[in-house]
């Protein structure tokens, strides 16, 4: 996305809001699944298709059942893999062109790194010891990144954003939930 003077604040707000809504969904959606009487397969699709963060999808899915947990995890990982073409299209749309020359490589390097890691892991050529080390390293990198966000977060700056972005993210979350429920009900009939 194009940089602006509020890019960092907006990114931090988005991460906080999405994490908060995912955590709320992890607690509430299994209750919704139970109240609606969804079978485990559809419950897994619903949870994996609607909750934003992978960890919360896994928590919610396995809170319902092992089958729902497995399907929720696979559904969420499919959604994650689909981010690659979405990011590519968005990058191409926002890429600036000067004198007919492309403004840079169309994919952010973290997406390329993600694809390389998925490819290496899927090829089973990485020794188990190295894979385990990399899994541990990635966990520490995630903890470090979250801690860095916390250190950089100013509650005063978050309050200045206003209610509209939170309302938008909440409505988007509810829209996705309704979309998956309606689509799943249609497909399963």
Image (tube, helix red, strand yellow):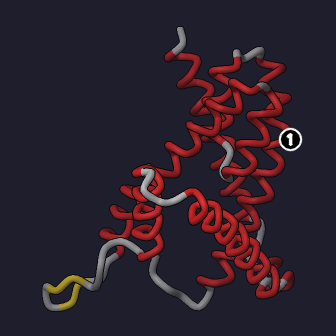
Residue 182 sits above or below residue 149 on the image: above
Q: Which residue is mark 1?
A: 27
Q: Percent position (x, y) of residue 131?
A: 57, 61
Residue 7 shown left or right of residue 92 in the figure: right
Q: Residue furthest top?
A: 189
Which quadrant of the figure has residue 136?
bottom right
Residue 48 sits above or below residue 84 on the image: above
Residue 185 shown left or right of residue 169 in the figure: left
Q: Residue at x 42, y 76 (%)?
A: 109
Q: Percent position (x, y) of residue 11?
A: 64, 75
Label 1 neighbourhood size at 10 Å, few (<14), some (14-19), many (20+)? some
Residue 176 shown left or right of residue 161 in the figure: left
Q: Nearer the viewer, residue 156 or 69?
A: 69
Q: Residue at x 29, y 79 (%)?
A: 105
Which quadrant of the figure has residue 168?
bottom right
Q: Residue at x 73, y 57 (%)?
A: 167
Q: Residue at x 73, y 73 (%)?
A: 140
Disc tally is 1
Task: Say what secondary structure mark 1 lies in.
Answer: helix
Q: Percent position (x, y) of residue 19?
A: 75, 59
Which quadrant of the figure has residue 175?
top right
Q: Residue furthest left?
A: 100
Residue 5 sits above or below residue 70 on the image: below
Q: Percent position (x, y) of residue 46?
A: 64, 31
């Amino acid at each position: 996305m194009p940089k602006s003077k509020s890019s960092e604040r907006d990114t931090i707000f988005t991460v906080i809001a999405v994490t908060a809504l995912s955590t709320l969904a992890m607690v509430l959606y299994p209750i919704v699944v139970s109240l609606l009487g969804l079978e485990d397969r559809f419950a897994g699709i619903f949870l994996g298709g609607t909750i934003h963060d992978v960890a919360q999808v896994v928590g919610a899915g396995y809170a319902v059942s092992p089958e729902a947990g497995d399907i929720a995890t696979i559904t969420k990982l499919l959604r994650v893999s689909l981010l690659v073409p979405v990011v590519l299209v968005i990058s191409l749309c926002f890429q600036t062109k000067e004198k007919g020359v492309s403004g840079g490589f169309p994919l952010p390097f973290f997406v390329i790194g993600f694809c390389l890691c998925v490819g290496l892991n899927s090829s089973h050529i990485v020794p188990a010891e190295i894979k385990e080390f990399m899994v541990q390293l990635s966990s520490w990198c995630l903890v470090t990144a979250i801690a860095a966000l916390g250190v950089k977060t100013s509650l005063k700056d978050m309050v200045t954003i206003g209610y509209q972005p939170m309302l938008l993210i909440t409505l988007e979350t509810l829209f996705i939930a309704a979309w998956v429920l309606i689509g799943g009900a249609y497909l399963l009939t």
